Image: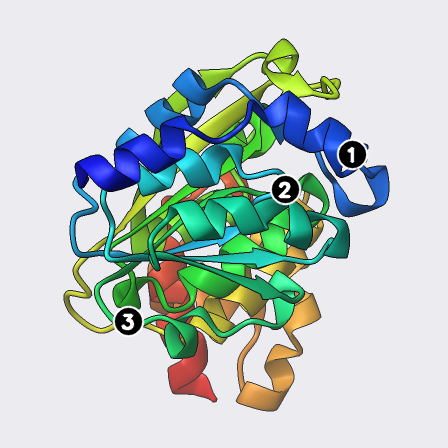
Amino acid sequence: MSSALDTALDALPPLREVIAEHELAARKSLGQNFLLDLNLTAKIARSAGDLTDVNILEVGPGPGGLTRGILRTAPASVTAIEKDSRCIAALQPLVEASGGRLKIVEADALEIDAIALLPAPRAIIANLPYNVATPLLLGWLRHIQEFRSLTLMFQREVAERITARPGSKDFGRLAIIAQWVSRPTRVVELPPQAFTPPPKVHSTVVDFRALPRDGAQPKFETMERLTAAAFGQRRKMLRQSLKSLGLSTYGLTPETLCATAGVEPTARAEELDIPAFVRLALTLEAGG
């Protein structure tokens, strides 16, 4: 980072003053919990690794605490998506201090195409609004090969579901999709008191790195449909839960689908590993 940018960031007012000046009371409807400790925001940004020459997307910058941490890693650029119009004015001094590195886009992150918005190499770092964290993640995982990394904050229970292993109570759709296309690693744990206002839950930052796409792979949509059916009735055996896929239109039954994929139809979804779901998905596509 240039000394000029360092000096400009150091001269910015404390985040609590920014919040008070612009009356940025956190809104529950937007899932807002502001992270004000700049040591923590710097730690989260550093957990993404070397960001030199990487174009960063941030979602929900709020008063700009994490944004300041990201800028200190000397990325090529930072594009921050903010839905709350109150925050736009509050972020303008940070835009000016960034020396052209920071751009604010007032928009709903669910409607943003990050790949079209940012040139490669690109990465995402975000303290995600809890109420839209999962749909945002699934949208980015669909195109994980286009990102150098995703470094995202979730409620701890969601992070546990993302990183769960087969056979555990937390293992489900989110773990399968995330671990099929990426290597998710929990990198930072944060208590409720780290935020303003404090949420009722602990938070965890998870770093995602794309896995190589070796061998035959099913479509993302197929894995979504399959896991939705398999875990829609997670206490039932696959021969029952997979009926919701409408297999007769593919000339299949749950039993023939499982037999062809080398899976026991009497198993429950949480007992299967990810390669088993890949085989089931490929068999489903072949039957279709």
Q: Position of residue 186 (x, y in %)?
A: 37, 27
Q: In the drawing, what numbered circle is on residue 206?
A: none
What residue would you read off at disc 2? 62
Q: Amino acid at mark 3?
A: Gln
Q: Amino acid at mark 1?
A: Ala
The residue lying toward the viewer, choosing from 141 and 105, is: 105
Q: Give the vertical position of 128 relative to 288 (above or below).
A: above
Asked whether the residues under the numbered discs 1 and 2 touch, taking CB atoms below 8 Å apart as contact, a structural biologist would say yes
Q: Position of residue 181 (x, y in %)?
A: 32, 57
Q: Secondary structure at mark 1?
A: loop
Which class describes the residues within 10 Å of circle 1: few (<14), some (14-19), or many (20+)? some
The residue lying toward the viewer, choosing from 54 and 18, is: 18
Q: Amino acid at mark 2?
A: Gly
Does residue 75 appear to the left or right of 141 in the view shown?
left
Instruction: Please tell me in which quadrant of the rendered image residue 140 appears.
Output: bottom left
What residue would you read off at disc 3? 217
